[in-house]
Image (cartoon, rainbow, N blue to C red):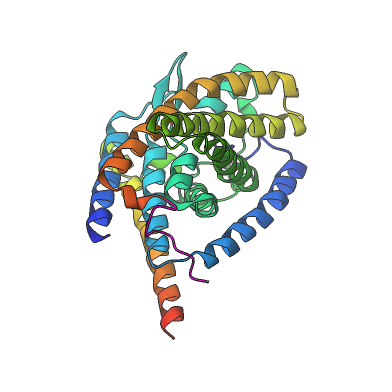
Amino acid sequence: MHIPDGFLSGKVCIATALLSLPVIVIASKKLSKQLGEKLIPKMGMLTAFIFAAQMFNFPVAAGTSGHLMGGVLAMLVAGPAAGVIVLFCVLIVQCLFFQDGGITALGANTFNMAIVGVLAGYIFYSAISKISKNKFVQYVAVFTASWASIVLASLACATELSMSGVVSFKTSAIAMGSVHAIIGIGEATITLIIYSFLKKVSPEIFFNAKGCCREVA
Amino acid sequence: MKKTFFIFAAITILVVALASLFASVSPDGLEWVAEKLGFIGIATESPLKAAMPDYAVAGISSPFWSSFLAGISGIGIISAVFFLINFILKKGRTN
C-alpha cells in the first residue's frame, strides 16, 4: 500500500510528515538506550530481509496482489522501537532508489506502515500474548497482530485519501479495508511461518528473549 | 551470531531470487482500489529520479536479472548503511 506521488494533497503530506517525525525521533531515542552490541546488525538483517520480502508480491483474489509488510515480524524480533525504525529504513530505500512510494508521501507511508503497522501490531500482540504462555495462544497473538497491522495501516491510508478529497471516507475505508482484510491473511500466515521457524532454529533472536537486547544505559 | 548472519543473508538473497522469478505483477491493494474507484490517474511523476524505478535495472533485458540486480543493490545499500552505523557506534563506545 505504498502511496505514490500525487494521491495525497499537500496538506495531508505535510500533516502526516509532522505526525511521523516525532515518533521516529522518540523511537530512535528509545533505541539508543537498548543498543546492545547485536541490535544494529540485527536491525540491518531485518531491514534487508523485509526489503526483499516486500519485492515478493503474492497473488490475492480478484486480480490483486499483496506482499509482506513485515511490521509485526520486525517488532517480534527487535522490539517495537526498532521495528518502527526498520520499517522506516525500508521505506526510505524503496522511495529513494526504486520509486516505490512517492517522496512527497513518505510521511504518510511512514505513518501507515512504520508507525500504525508496527505499533498497532505491538498492542494486539502484547494484549493477546500475555493471556497465556501456551504455544497456541502465542500463535494466535502473532496471527491476529499481523492481520490487524495490515488492516489498520490500510484504514490509515484510506483516511489520508479521504482527507485529500480523493474519495469519501466511507468508500475508501470499505474498499481499502476489505482488500487488506484478505491481504492481511497472507501477512499473518507468512509472519506465523517465519515466527515458528525462528522459534525452532533461533529462539534467542527474539526481543526480550534471555540474553538478548539487554539495556546498556 | 555469525552463523545466524550468514543464514539470514542466504535466505534474503534467495527471497530476492524467488521474487524476481515469481512475484505477481497484479496491482497491489491500494492500486487496485485506485483503479476501481477511478483515481489511479492522479498519480504524478515523481519529482525525484530514482535509480531503479519499479525494481528494474535499465539496460538489462532479462526480467529476472534486471529485478535480481535491483534487489541485490537494495540489499547492498541497506547493508552498507547499517555497517557504517555499527562501525561509528562501536567506535563511539570504545573511545
Q: Against A151, is A26 above or below?
A: below
Q: Name the residue rendered at 33%, 36% in the picture.
A: A196
Where is residue A75 drawn, in percent x and y? 48, 46
Image quadrant in which the N terminus of chain A is located? top right
Return the residue nearer the eye: B56 or B82. Answer: B82
Residue A209 colored in magenta in the image? yes
Is residue B63 something that shows in the picture?
no
In the picture, measured across the screen, residue A32 lies left or right of residue A53, that is right
Residue A40 colored in magenta in the image? no
- Quadrant housing residue A155: top right
Q: How many marks?
A: 0
- Quadrant housing residue A118: top right
Q: Name the residue rendered at 41%, 83% in the picture.
A: B94
Where is residue A206 drawn, in percent x and y? 39, 49
- Quadrant housing residue A188: top left
Where is residue B77 drawn, in percent x and y? 39, 58
Q: Which residues are magenta?
A: A207-217
The outermost residue toward the bottom is: B95
In the picture, measured across the screen, residue A187 lies left or right of residue A200, that is right
Is residue A188 something that shows in the picture?
yes
Magenta stretch: dominant secondary structure: loop
Return the residue nearer the eye: A193 or B60. Answer: A193
Where is residue A82 drawn, in percent x and y? 50, 54
Q: Against B64, is B35 above or below?
A: above
Q: Name the residue rendered at 60%, 17% in the picture.
A: B36
The outermost residue toward the top is: A62
In the picture, measured across the screen, residue A21 lies left or right of residue A142, that is right
